[in-house]
Image (tube, rainbow, N blue to C red):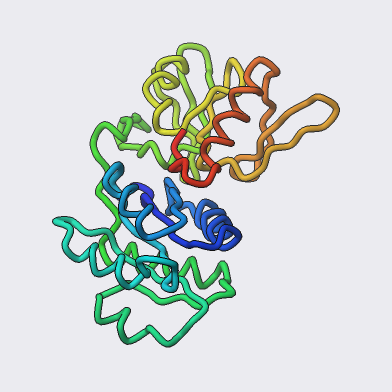
Amino acid sequence: MTVPLRVLVVDDERPALEEIGWLLSRDPRIGRVRTAASASEALRALQEDDVDVVFSDIRMPGLSGLDLAQVLTRFRDPPKVVFVTAHDDHAVEAFDLDVVDYLLKPLRESRLAEAVRRVVEAGAARPTADDDAIAVDQGGVTRLVRRWEVQYVEAQGDYARLHTAAGNPLVRTALATLEEQWREAGFVRIHRSLLVNLAHVTEVRSEGGRVSVVVAGEELGVARRHARELRDRLVRRARPGSGGAP
């Protein structure tokens, strides 16, 4: 099992930067998206934060994407590199630098998804640490549910039901305990009985003062007292340069 990729997007054109970041954030294999408006800014970001893959433009003022990729080869544990560019005349140079993929603008989401697949297969995805999992007992068999798999958690008395794509196991853990333990991983309380994983929120709805979120195709109501924190956490996650982490 692997955890979602930590991504850095580099492009000097703000619309392209925001579009690529937004498209990547929709991919369930992507966990955190950080952005940089230049190669120099990207290098500063890489000093501050660990990144699994860099999606970079090539032609940029100052250091180019090729320059950036060359610098990354000197890292002890370099991130994978994917180029996203409007020009196809640097492909040979790019692959001499052992980049994973070379995408041409305008970008198609399906092509970007294919690049993410190649990154995963190239070994950028990290093994899940033990503290990222929770043990559940199902019919006498204990298995581990990885935290990133959990779409949302529902309180049921002294238990919590973990909603995942593979099933909805019940664990003997209080919702408040999971909220405290998983907050830094992007989970936020939206109701006294609901905790959602921001990575799985695909839509926020507001109508007549009522707020709800869509998670895995299911609409979940947001209590008024939790609405502001939810919005703040989502904004911080989506804001360019924020790193995507709550």
Which of these two is toward me, 124 or 76?
A: 76
Q: Does residue 217 appear left or right of residue 179 in this picture? A: right
* Residue that appears at 45% across and 49% down: 33
* Residue visible at 42% across and 69% down in the picture: 115
Q: How many marks?
A: 0
In this rendered view, identify the residue nearer to me: 165 or 98. 98
- Residue 94 location in percent, x, y? 32, 79
- Front residue of 64/74: it is 64
Residue at image coords 68%, 19%: 223
Against 217, residue 11 (above or below) is: below
Q: Residue furthest right?
A: 208
The location of residue 163, given as percent across then percent down, is 51, 35
Extreme residue in the front direction? 62
Q: Nearer the viewer, residue 157 or 194?
A: 194
Furthest-top residue in view?
158
**Which residue lies at the image location 31% right of the left edge and 30% below the top edge?**
135
Tell whether 147 sits left or right of 80. Answer: right
Where is residue 211, by image quadrant?
Answer: top right
Q: Where 88 sits versus 102, above or below? A: below
Picture layout, residue 16 above or below residue 158: below
What is the x, y in percent for residue 13? 55, 62
Image x and y of residue 102, in percent? 41, 76
Residue 145 drawn above or below residue 11: above
